[in-house]
Amino acid sequence: LGWHLYRDPDTNKIIAYQYGANLNTRAFVAINVDDKKAAAFFTNSESGMSIANQVLSSPDFAPIGNVQAFFKRMPEYP
């Protein structure tokens, strides 16, 4: 239930994020504390997060900053 804090080494901005995984559902919420921008990603599938990195990193939709680094830190599916 806790939040994680990540400091982007390129921009020095803080991103708070939370990831959740249950049977057949996944959730991810991130907030760029410095820019006051956020994104939420909820799925009703065990493999739903497989596209989250692509969606949230797209140049057309990247409100919170570089997410690849902390996506790698998230645990795999339980």
Image: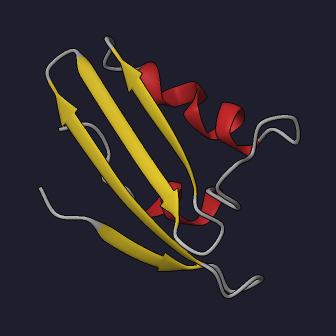
Q: Nearer the viewer, residue 66 or 32?
A: 32
The structure's colour scheme is: secondary structure
Residue at 31% x, 54% y: name it. 18
Residue at 49% x, 58% y: name it. 31
Q: Nearer the viewer, residue 39 or 22?
A: 39
Query: Vertically, is 76 above or below 23?
Result: below
Q: Is residue 7 left or right of residue 20?
A: right
- Residue 53, horizontal then vertical, whole percent: 62, 40
Which residue is farthest right? Answer: 59
Q: Quadrant of residue 17?
A: bottom left
Q: Is residue 66 left or right of residue 44?
A: right
Q: Nearer the viewer, residue 62 or 35?
A: 35
Q: Is residue 56 left or right of residue 22?
A: right
Residue at 23% x, 41% y: name it. 20
- Residue 19, horizontal then vertical, whole percent: 31, 47
Residue at 46% x, 53% y: name it. 30
The quadrant of the picture occupied by the C terminus is: top left
Q: How many marks?
A: 0
The quadrant of the picture occupied by the N terminus is: bottom left
- Residue 2, horizontal then vertical, whole percent: 16, 63
Q: Is residue 34 left or right of residue 66?
A: left
Query: Vertically, is 54 above or below 5?
Result: above
Query: Vertically, is 14 above or below 16?
Result: below
Query: Vertically, is 76 above or below 16?
Result: above
